[in-house]
Amino acid sequence: MNEDQQSVKDLNHKQHKIHQRSSVLQNKPRRMSERREINVRESQESQEGMRSNSQTFPNQIVEAFHNGSTRMRSWFCGKEDETKKEELIRSTQSLHHYIHKYFNITNRLSEILNIQMNQNILPAVSANKSESIEQNCVRVRRVMSQILGLCEREDKLVQKSIEPALYEKIAFSVGSLEEKAVVIKDVHDKTMGVLGNVFCPVVTFQLARSNLTDVMPPVELLKSQPVSSFVLLGDLKQSSKLITKLLCGSQNHQTSLDKAIQLMQDLLSILRPPCDSYNDILCDVEAYVKIISKKM
């Protein structure tokens, strides 16, 4: 190849490279423009995604909080409801207990009097689950009145049967317990058992002079509580649901539960104080007889 041909070839080669570089330079702005468009589009999509997430995330938080709050309220309401049901059951069981306690104390006093008087004057009496609260209280009050009347009559008989000085020693706090024990035994020997067993004068005096009238079931107060006349004693052993329905009918559940608790507590506040005092009278009689018997 001669020099002219070689020069032409080199010139063509250089022109080809120049053309390539020119094409690259011409295409570069277009590619940069395309890249910018892609970047802008990606940026816009990213911002839209962020906006979407920023809107969705608070909604998710609100929804989660609402669901959690609802569950929490349901849990607290459920716990409160269970607590009130337990309170109602405790109230009804306590009322049931005190009504039976009245009968138990009365039967124990009747037993003591029957033994000391050598007679079966006072039969046992039982609470009746098929009777209303008021009816049971009326029956036990009637027997308590019989006990009081019997003791007052026997106490008057003792006063007529022995010397006033001896009665004073038996009845009142005169002398020591040892002296009182000697006097009681002496009276029993002298009367030859006409006044009953040896402790009969002491027991009848204790009960005749006690406040037995004040500790009887206050029936008049019970009549001011209408539920006492239609709630049976056996109803007090029912479930809280049945008791609430019995007392309040078909009212709102929560309102009914609160009302039922209040009704039972009102009845309990009427019967509990006198019943506890009645039990104190029984304990005093039993303790006094026991102390004196040890001194004989």
Image (tube, rainbow, N blue to C red):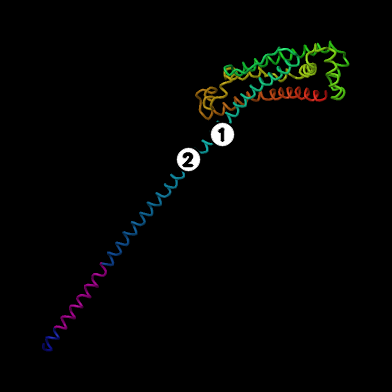
Binning the other alpha carbons within 10 Å of mark 1 as few (below 14), some (14 to 19) or many (20 upward) gives few
Name the spot of residue 120 as percent of width and height, x first.
Answer: 71, 12
- Which mark is on residue 83? 1
Query: In the image, is residue 26 part of the stretch drawn in magenta?
Result: yes
Name the spot of residue 24 as percent of width and height, x first.
Answer: 23, 72
Name the spot of residue 71 as percent of width and height, x first.
Answer: 48, 40
Q: Residue drawn at (69%, 23%), measured in percent from left and top?
A: 275
- Which mark is on residue 71? 2
Name the spot of residue 17 as percent of width and height, x first.
Answer: 20, 78
Q: Nearer the viewer, mark 2 or mark 1?
A: 1
Magenta-colored span: 9-30
- Horizontal side, residue 146 vs residue 240: left or right: right
Outermost residue, bottom side? 3
Amino acid type, label 1: Thr
Q: Nearer the viewer, residue 194 or 103?
A: 194
Q: Earlier in the sequence, mark 2 or mark 1?
A: 2
Where is 35 relative to 222, above or below? Answer: below
The secondary structure making up most of the magenta span is helix
Where, quadrant-wise, is the N terminus in this rendering?
A: bottom left
Q: Nearer the viewer, residue 99 or 106?
A: 106
SS type, badge 2: helix
SS type, badge 1: helix
Image quarter of residue 188: top right
Q: Nearer the viewer, residue 28 or 237?
A: 237
Amino acid type, label 2: Arg
Count of numbered circles on the image = 2
- Horizontal side, residue 188 vs residue 46: left or right: right
